[in-house]
Amino acid sequence: MDMKKKKFNEMLGIDDADKKIIEMIEKDPDITHSKIAEEIEKSQPAVGARIIKLERKHLLTKQVGFNVKHVDIKTAIVYVSTKDVDGIVEKIKTCPFVNHGFKISGDYNLLLFIAASDLQTIERLVDLCFRKDPDVINVKTNILIDSIHDFIVPISFDIEKFDGRHCGPDCQMRSDLPKFKFDKVLESEE
């Protein structure tokens, strides 16, 4: 039995020049087409065409947000075990606090990245959106302390509208869940 592993080039349908372009842009997103062209010994228009092709294949994307290595916005990694994965996903898909979400296998079936200005807000959201939900079996929250590499997290300024009861205008909180009003954090505590 031949257990030959496929290389990324083959799996992604790219050649060594494309791979080098991806590596160079990952290292320096502001690198010029001229610098790339010089390095891979192709013309500048050829580099531009390759970059467009890589973008269409979703191998190069731009993401705007904050870099957790450099900005003091609190980020939590929240694991959720639920009887209704799709129901929870539907509920949180427009939540401005949920920056990334993944269906996963194992003891927990959802992994979420939640960002806020402070840990109390994250805790309130976890309570409201998950711990009080009858379809949620278990929740585990870890606070991201530091990132080894640059990690960009998209941010929605709708998080500033959080009043302790719901996350914003498009909040999908179920009507059958109790609504709680939390005291606002005093300015002196911030």
Image (spheres, rainbow, N blue to C red):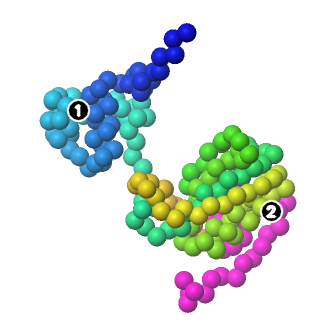
Secondary structure of residue under mark 1: helix
Q: Which residue occupies the extreme bottom position in the image?
A: 188
Q: Earlier in the sequence, mark 2 or mark 1?
A: 1
Pick the front one: 19 or 184: 19
Horizontal side of 157 relative to 10 (left or right) equals: right
Q: Which residues are magenta?
A: 163-190
Horizontal side of 121 relative to 5 (left or right) equals: right
Where, quadrant-wise, is the C terminus in this rendering? bottom right
Please tell me whether residue 177 belongs to the stretch shown in magenta. Answer: yes
Residue in the image at 17% along x and 41% along y: 35
Residue in the image at 68% along x and 47% along y: 110
Q: How many marks?
A: 2
Q: Is 99 situated above or below 52?
A: below
Q: Which residue is mark 2?
A: 132
Secondary structure of residue under mark 2: loop
User: Where in the figure is residue 7, as x and y percent of width and height?
Assistant: 42, 24
